Image (cartoon, rainbow, N blue to C red):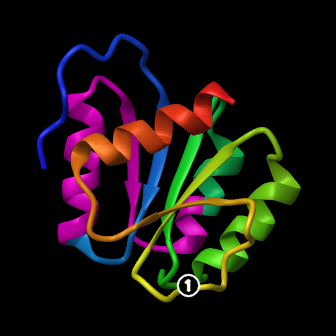
Amino acid sequence: MSAPPGRLVSWRIIAADSDKTKLDALTGVLRDAGHCVFPVQDGRSALELTIELPNIHLLLTNTRLGGMDGPALIKLVRYMRPGVRILHIAEVGEDEIPQDVLTLQEPFTAGQLLSAAESLLAS
């Protein structure tokens, strides 16, 4: 995945995925686009960072995480930090996530990831 050029806005993003290879790819795309990314491999760390760090714009999470799964993480983040936007990454057929959470189905391109994040942050 390579990021499209020309991104001007910088966001603070927490990226959570238990798969280190996927997490590294997500982090790379987002950083290449000029964003500040805090990568974590488990749900508890994602929740802690979301609560503790100021000005988090986006939580990017997968369904399956160590320590806390994606649906539980989303529920807690919505309660504790309702202003944080959430982008969920899912494999085809996963349906545990609330319908009003934007879900990006795997596989996807860097452009699709950035476009989904932009649409969330613009709303």
Q: Could you tell whether 80 is left or right of 48 in the image? A: right
The three-letter code of the residue at mark 1 reads Gly
Write the residue at 66% across / 44% down. 85
Q: Is residue 40 visible?
A: yes
Count of numbered circles on the image = 1
- Coordinates of residue 7 in the picture (x, y in percent): 31, 17
Query: In the image, 101: left or right of 82?
Result: left
Mark yes or no: residue 57 visible: no
Residue in view at x 39 percent, y 69 percent: 17
Residue drawn at point x = 27 percent, y = 60 percent:
108
In the rendered image, the vertical position of residue 68 relative to residue 115, given as above or below: below
- Magenta span: chief secondary structure: helix
| Residue matched to label 1 | 67
How crowded pointer 1 is (Cα within 10 Å; few <14, some 14-19, many 20+) is rated as few
Which x, y percent locates residue 16? 44, 63
Q: In what element is the residue under mark 1?
A: loop
**Residue that lies at the very extreme toward the right in this rendered image:** 79
**The one of 93 and 30 positioned closer to us in this rendering:** 93
| Image position of 28 with respect to 22: above or below | above
Which residue is at a point 70% across and 66% down the rendered structure image? 74
Closer-to-camera residue (107/45): 107
In the image, residue 68 lies at what x, y percent? 61, 82
Q: Is residue 81 magenta?
A: no
Residues shaded magenta: 21-46
Quarter of the figure with residue 104: bottom left
Measuring from the top left, give residue 12's x and y in whole percent. 49, 32
